[in-house]
Amino acid sequence: MKVLVTDKINEAAGRIIEAVAEVDFLPTMSEDELVKIIADYDALMVRSQTKVTPKIIEAGKNLKIIGRAGVGVDNIDLEAATQKGIIVVNSPDGNTMAAAEHTIALMLAMARNIAPAATSTKEGKWDRSKFTGTELYKKTLGIIGFGKIGSHVGEVALALGMKVVVYDPFTSKEVVEKFGGEYVENLDEFWAKPDFITVHVPKTKDTVNMINKDTIKKMKQGVRLVNCARGGIINETDLKDAINSGYVASAAVDVYENEPNITECPLINCTGNIVLTPHLGASTTEAQMNVAIDVAEQIKEVLSGGSASSAVNIPSLRPDKLEPVKDYMGISENSGELAVQLSNGVIKTIEITAGGDLADLDIQPLEVAVLKGVLSSRLEGVNYVNAPVIAKKRGIDIVSTRTKAKCNFAGLITVKLVTDKDTTVVSGAIVAHGIPRIVKINDYETSIRPEKHMLIVPHTNKPSMIARVAQVIGEKEINIGSMNVVQKNDKHETESIMVINVESVVGDDTLDLIAKIDGVHNPKYVKLTV
């Protein structure tokens, strides 16, 4: 067997893999260059520079595993890899400390004007009064996203004498208060509290442009912002304007919307106090060593016939458990994804009920699939291995039951998601060999094919509703693949839902137009993993 390692990964990875396979260390290559040679390899190990495209994956006829020496896998086409049966792994914990420390370093650097002061001093100047800073002691740090990195940043901040305020819809009030911070339930209440704000969330449809000119206006004047998470979470143009106007006192940014094309970033022309670094969050000797060793061990294990510990796209569960229920893995994950995207508030309980033939089987793989669907819709780095750990850490109760009640399907998996604001129920089934369907959404009996892009439109059952919704979608040049309109099982019921499978992302502007239609109630765009 042969393994290709590229993107300047620590050579310690090669020493681990050499126990089971021949290892080639090669420089970063273009797509065409990789396509020419990848067929000779059983595994590929990369960092962020190499883009593992469908073309490369298709050419890798012997590939069994692709390893990303880092946290994100944005540069690897997961759908193409999954379709080819190739395991994709990463190292979700390897650079946690490095990223947290870089966040603290940037926060201190901007507070004490380290970068401009260093430049001035090197020029032979002695402008002490020009670089008067501000102390972190007794200031309030607002943390958006309280995962491994965010919580470690909070721990250091508390040690520095700061107060900590947390917003994270996937973390409970009890967890934050036990930590020593203040839990804030919604962002509108959060913005005005901190003196410093740092973000530690993935880049999703919910977090893109989370910090923009409108939300900045809700913050304290003189607030200081840090972003070591993902480019695009803070609107770069709006941040530049806010700094130049003096409303935002300073900012420290490590990630950008269009990396590595930094010349296109508005922030480099910012005249105010801003610290910019070239995505150095994971750039420590220790972090690079940790992620290299972690991924190399997984590649070694998989090539030896074992399981990966951090598989992103394929569950690392024992074959004897997975085989009886494997056909239901996809619909279970989709049911979890759909339920959480239709719900509001902080998750308290996830109830998973198996019906039909599934009631007689070990459904642990399906429970993990549901958790992955629920958590990965809001969090980065969730997989079949760490989903139960993340759920436990965030104080989410998992209840698994079986029912012998009469069932119209061979097997039925039902997800009941209970938050502090509402309860959402979604059921999934296999209606025929290889044909998954969502068969229930709350009180509505449905038969919906899970698709990547879906619109859920609750509405009053009256004439022209379908036409008016379709008109808005059409005017936005969004193609409709299929539509399912369902009324509750009550002939006197006046409420229905449309479930519309579309072929592209539905933006907030489109949702706003649909919501303005008389009779429509809270339409939702849902993105599924299919």
Image: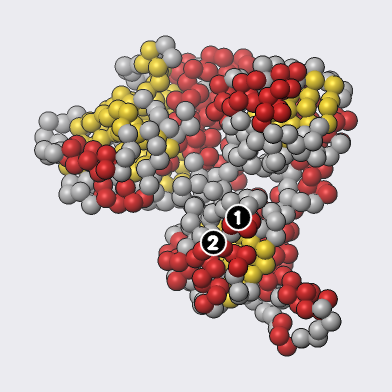
Q: Is residue 455 left or right of residue 298?
A: left
Residue 52 placement (x, y as % from top left): 64, 32
Residues at circles 2 and 1 in contact by the CB criterion of under 8 Å: yes
**Rendered image quadrant of residue 45:** top right
Q: Is residue 249 visible?
A: yes
Q: Residue at x 80, y 40 (%)?
A: 8
Q: Is residue 460 left or right of residue 53?
A: left
Question: What label does residue 191 carry, if any?
Answer: none
Residue 206 in picture, x, y percent from top left: 46, 50
The image shows residue 289, relative to residue 126, as above or below, that is above
Residue at the spot of label 1: 256
Is residue 168 shown left or right of residue 525?
A: right
Numbered label tally? 2
Where does residue 333 sit, x and y in percent of width and height?
48, 30
Does residue 502 appear to the left or right of 28 in the view shown?
A: left
The furthest residue to the bottom: 129
Q: CA distance from mark 2 to mark 1?
A: 8 Å
Q: Position of residue 343 (x, y in %)?
A: 38, 44
| Relative vertical location of residue 442 with respect to residue 54 in this rendering, above or below | below
Dot 2 or dot 1: first in sequence order is 2
Residue, x 59% and y 57% (percent of image)? 264
* Residue shown at the point (48%, 56%) measured from the top left: 209
Residue 166 visible in the current orientation: no
Residue 291, picture quadrant? top right
Residue topped by disc 2: 236
Where 445 falls versus 525 (above or below)?
above
